[in-house]
Each structure stands twice: as C-alpha cells, then as structure tokens.
C-alpha cells in the first residue's frame, strides 16, 4: 500500500493518531465530505454519541463503495460542538480504527450547518 504513517523524531509522541501520512505512488485519492449522524434513510440520529457512530459508519460505507477500507484513510478532521463528547469520540475512533492511526485534527466548534448535529467528520483516503 502506498501509505506510510509516521511520527518523526523531534516531534512529540502522538496519541491515537500519526503526525504525518505520506501517500507515495497512489493511483486514487478519495476526499469525503463531512459526515454527520444521518442514517441511510435520511433521518438524523438524536444523541451525540450515536451521531459519532453513524458518522463513522457513513465513512465506512463510502470507503467500501470506492473499493477502500479504513486502512486507506490518511486524514480525518473531526468537528465536535460539545467538548464533553471528546471521550466518546476517542473511544469510538479507537474501536473503529483499531491500530490504524491516520493523521487527525479535532476541533471544538460553536456549531455546525444544522444545529441538531453535534459531530461532523471529514476524511481523506488513498490507494
């Protein structure tokens, strides 16, 4: 696979992410729009923790539709409207990604485009 995740010497040791993701010789790059807690039938998930799970499920479905898996993820950007959701995000991310550690950014924001959503996750993948 053309993805190398790295944590160079001279930079602090990261948590459950990598400082860099080098994509060498990739033939395909997939950029995903921000995914929120919307079920396949278009209905929103109410609870913030369930929204996290649904956003990750949506990402998995999109990856699969393009012949990719979580192992192809090189970057995730997460927007939370409530800092109390950080532990739930970290637990869900760890369970969902396993040992894969793409580059990652987590932001606490005042709100998303629709106030019923508490979580939005953007992602990029390559193969």
Image (spheres, rainbow, N blue to C red):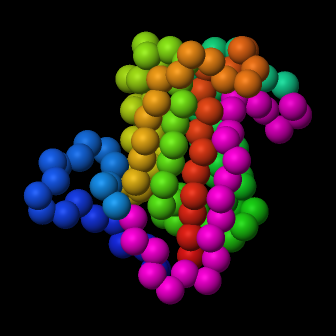
- Does the rendering let one see residue 57? no
Residue 73 at x, y percent in the picture = 51, 60
- Does the rendering let one see residue 38? yes
Where is 121 relative to 103, above or below?
above
Residue shown at 73%/24% (left/top)?
A: 113
Residue 14 at x, y percent in the picture = 23, 46
Quadrant in the picture for the C terminus: bottom right
Is residue 23 inside the magenta stretch? Answer: yes
Q: How many numbered discs sit on the rendered protein?
A: 0
Q: Is residue 10 left or right of residue 21?
A: left
Residue 77 at x, y percent in the picture = 51, 43
Q: Residue furthest left?
A: 10
Residue shown at 46%/30% (left/top)?
A: 107
Residue shown at 50%/48% (left/top)?
A: 76
Q: Is residue 83 left or right of residue 127?
A: left
Q: Quadrant of residue 38?
A: top right
Range drawn in magenta: 21-42
Q: Residue furthest right?
A: 41
Residue 22 at x, y percent in the picture = 40, 71
Residue shown at 38%/23% (left/top)?
A: 87
Where is 75 relative to 122, above or below?
below
Q: Quadrant of residue 69?
A: bottom right
């Amino acid at each position: 696979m053309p993805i190398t995740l790295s944590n160079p010497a001279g930079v602090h040791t990261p948590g459950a992410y990598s400082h860099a993701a080098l994509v060498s010789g990739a033939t395909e790059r997939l950029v995903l729009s921000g995914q929120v807690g919307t079920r396949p039938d278009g209905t929103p998930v109410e609870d913030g923790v369930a929204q996290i799970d649904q956003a990750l499920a949506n990402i998995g479905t999109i990856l699969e539709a393009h012949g990719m898996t979580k192992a192809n993820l090189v970057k995730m950007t997460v927007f939370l409207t409530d800092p109390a959701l950080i532990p739930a995000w970290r637990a869900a991310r760890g369970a969902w990604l396993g040992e894969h550690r793409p580059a990652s950014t987590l932001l606490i924001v005042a709100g998303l485009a629709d106030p019923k959503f508490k979580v939005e996750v953007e992602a990029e993948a390559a193969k």
